[in-house]
Amino acid sequence: MMMTMTTTAPFPTARLEDGDVRVLLLENIHTDGADFLRGKGFQVETRDGALGEDDLIEAIQGVHLLGIRSTTYITEKVLAAAPDLLAIGAFCIGTNQIDLTATTRQGVAVFNAPYSNTRSVVELAIAEIISLARRLHEKSTDMHAGVWNKSAAGSHEIRGRTLGIIGYGNIGSQLSVIAEALGLSVVFYDIDDKLALGNAKRCSTLEELLAVSDVVTLHVDGRPGNAGLFGAEEMAQMKPRSLFLNLSRGIAVDTAALRENLESGHIAGAAVDVFPIEPKRQGDAFDSDLRGLKNVILTPHVGGSTEEAQQDIGRFVASKLRSYASYGGTSLSVNMPELNLPADGSKHRLALVHRNAPGVLATINGLLGEHGVNIEAQSLSTRGEIGYVVTDVADEIGEDVLRELASLPETVRLRQLS
């Protein structure tokens, strides 16, 4: 499949074949993702760690598809320095590390994997709840130190306890079902109106949840409003000797306040997988207020890091990147209007991202008609201020037509796919 590409420049000048598409994958993305894209003929470069802004700007030159996880931040400055970039794949759940306003303004599609590692996070949460309740991590540490401490003191079953879930999305709701099957009573709090699953009960306020929960677990997204969501005030409202988990976003929790509550014994134990500041590469030094506490399980942001989850994510996001680059498909895009488009090698395809203004489609079709271009199929979708129209025609479109379409004041990005 041939592809003509443009940035926000007035006219598309570079024609690419799939074999010329350059892909950069960062942060140990599963090899299945890279293998899939290589199998489609793309040039793929992989790097183990995340990149800071300046290093990323240097590395992204000439790159058409970028794959990241949660530690590489895509800023407006990065995007401004990446005129060839067509799409970004977040090989994870969240996209808060990406400036979605800037990507949309530049016509760069963003894809993620919103469901692929849900089960992995849920299983880790269950494992940590049981480990904290039975003090398994403390027993193991003692044993490694040569201490035989065979005592039931402080060890409890989770059956009959109440689990409070803050954030009842894909992960929170699935955790609710599995926890209930293990004998836990479940209450949850979410700012959105969510349907309770099983026997779970919705709390109308966070305070209500904290007052009744033996275990509190956070499963919120990384939107700015969640920064500092759980601090000293919320911890003070938790039941004495309750347990706390954060497997969602590091910015949501005041770790200094959490340490104080753990040291005082108000919170009996905690498991934390995410941190406000995280190392960018394997082996980099890690520091946290929570280090050195015997009643805390610390894990290096591995909630979704199982072989199964990373393999699924690698394949899923890679397929979305390929579909957009080669065919213009935007199914499940985070920021672009959705069009699920089949490959059709018998036609020439024109993909145009535009500002969503009245009369744009009529203008495009009028211009094509003036040049005798016969439209065989056309799909249009809008999302907020952005529109996306894909047009299939029988004959190749001339450069004069492309030039006029690229020059329309509403045009953000124009590509010819054939």
Image (spheres, grey):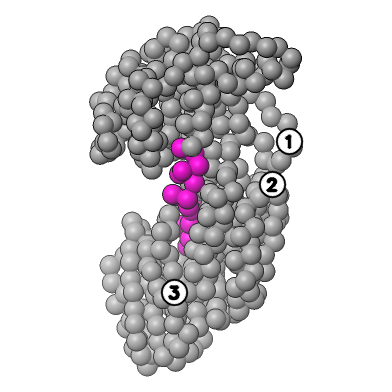
Q: Position of residue 389 (x, y in %)?
A: 37, 72
Residue receiving disc 1: 284
What label sits on residue 49 in the rendered view? 2
Q: Amino acid at mark 3?
A: Ala
Q: Nearer the viewer, residue 54 or 162?
A: 162
Sequence-first disc among 2 and 1 = 2
User: Distance between the Cα atoms at labels 1 and 3?
Assistant: 43 Å
What residue appears at the point 56 percent right and 31 percent down from the top-left corner? 273
Q: Is residue 222 magenta?
A: no
Sequence-first disc among 1 and 3 = 1
Mark 3 surroundings within 10 Å by alpha-carbon count, few (fewer than 14), some (14 through 19), many (20 or more):
many
User: Distance between the Cα atoms at labels 2 and 1?
Assistant: 10 Å
Q: Nearer the viewer, residue 357 or 307?
A: 307
> Does 107 sit above or below residue 222?
below
Nearest-to-viewer mark from 1 and 3: 1
Q: Amino acid at mark 1?
A: Asp
Q: Position of residue 349 (x, y in %)?
A: 44, 81
Mark 1 surroundings within 10 Å by alpha-carbon count, few (fewer than 14), some (14 through 19), many (20 or more):
few
Left or right relative to 198: residue 59: right
Q: Amino acid at mark 2?
A: Gly
What residue appears at the point 39 percent right and 18 percent down from the top-left corner? 214
User: Distance between the Cα atoms at labels 3 and 2?
Assistant: 33 Å
Mark 2 surroundings within 10 Å by alpha-carbon count, few (fewer than 14), some (14 through 19), many (20 or more):
many
First to last magenta residue range:
102-122
What residue appears at the point 51 percent right and 86 percent down from the top-left corner? 399
What label sits on residue 351 in the rendered view? 3
> Does 288 sit above or below residue 168?
above
Left or right relative to 352: residue 151: right
Q: Quadrant of residue 381?
A: bottom left
